[in-house]
Amino acid sequence: LEVGNEAPKFSALDQDGNNYLWLIFQEAGFVLVVYKSIHTGLNDPGQGLRDRVSEFSDLGAVIVGASFDTVEEQKKFFE
């Protein structure tokens, strides 16, 4: 994807098994961060993004993180 391109349509489950469709985030604008696993932590680019959350919030954008972990792994991580 290039900056400004339309995001692909997607759906994903959160740690509670709730299904989120891309449409929910499209109207607000969002930054999709994809990482291998919640257990690996954020790398340098991810940490930089974390440090700039307020800049994205000021623009009305939501940061959405996605990993390849199962719902059960995510739930355990957040507990």
Image (cartoon, rainbow, N blue to C red):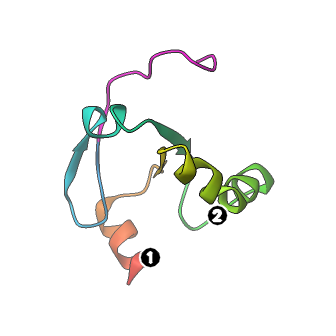
Quadrant assignment for the N terminus: top right
Left or right of 10: which side holds 3? Answer: right
Q: Is residue 63 above or below residue 3?
A: below
Query: Which region of the structure is painted magenta?
Result: 1-11
In which quadrant is the C terminus drawn? bottom left
**Label disc, if present, on residue 40 of the rendered structure:** 2
Kindly identify the amino acid type of the residue bearing the numbered disc 2.
Answer: Thr
Is 5 colored magenta in this rendering? Answer: yes
Q: Secondary structure at mark 1?
A: helix
Q: Position of residue 73 (x, y in %)?
A: 38, 68
Whether residue 53 sits left or right of residue 61 in the image: it is: right
- Look at the magenta stretch and give its main secondary structure: loop
The answer to which of marks 2 and 1 sits earlier in the sequence is 2
Give left or right: position of 42 versus 74: right
Q: Residue, x 69% and y 52% (percent of image)?
A: 49
x, y percentage for residue 57? 53, 53
- Residue 8 counted in the magenta span: yes
What residue did someone put label 1 on? 77
Label 2 and label 1: CA atoms lie apart by 12 Å
Q: Residue at x 58, y 48 (%)?
A: 56
Closer to the camera in the image, 6 or 74: 6
From the viewer's perspective, tell me whether residue 8 is left or right of residue 5: left
Vertically, is 27 above or below 76?
above
* Rendered location of residue 75, percent (x, y): 33, 73
- Give the image location of residue 45, x and y in percent: 76, 49
Q: Return the residue found at the far front.
A: 58
Q: Where is residue 54, by image quadrant?
A: bottom right
Asked which secondary structure carries label 2, the reply is loop
- Relative to 7, residue 17 above or below: below
